Image: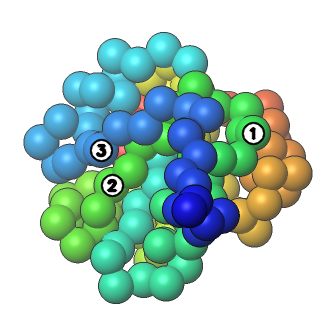
Amino acid sequence: MCRSSDIVFPSIVVESELTDFDADQRLLAMSGVSLVVFTSVGCASCRYAREQLPGLELAVDRLCWIDAGNNGGLVERYSVFHLPALFVVRDGEFYGALQSRLTRIELNAALGQALGGTAEELP
């Protein structure tokens, strides 16, 4: 007997785990739009983000997850003060932080606004 809670829906985007050791190199090499998400194991909002973001129809090519607890260098460089923290990178260029609720419509609007701004070098 299969219950609805037993069904696992596949992610609609590519997901990557980044660390202090490889984040810069990998982000610079990736083409397209990456949503970089800082999370932590003990954060309820982070668990929600981990569960929901992969299934949303977001205007990104990939989700890049960074464990804030294990990657203090990236946390400091990106000035992460709250979790989950979301940032946009396109073709190796940094477009800043996203301030949005974790819904498809609001995230896509925030992505569009961020990508319409001026790009900078990665932090």
Residue at mark 2 to residue at mark 3: CA–CA distance: 6 Å
* Kind of residue at badge 3: Glu
91 over 43 or under it: above or below: above
Viewer-nearest of discs 1 and 3: 1
Quarter of the image holding residue 92? top left
Residue wearing tag 3 = 17
* Kind of residue at badge 2: Ile
Residue wearing tag 1 = 57
Circles 2 and 3: CB atoms closer than 8 Å:
yes
Q: Earlier in the sequence, mark 1 or mark 3?
A: 3
Comparing 22 with 62, the one in front is 62
Residue at mark 2 to residue at mark 1: CA–CA distance: 21 Å
Q: Earlier in the sequence, mark 2 or mark 1?
A: 1
Quarter of the image holding residue 64? top left
Q: Is residue 110 visible?
A: no
In this picture, residue 105 sits left or right of residue 20: right
Q: Is residue 103 visible?
A: yes
Secondary structure state at the residue bearing disc 1? loop
Check the picture and name the quadrant holding the N terminus: bottom right
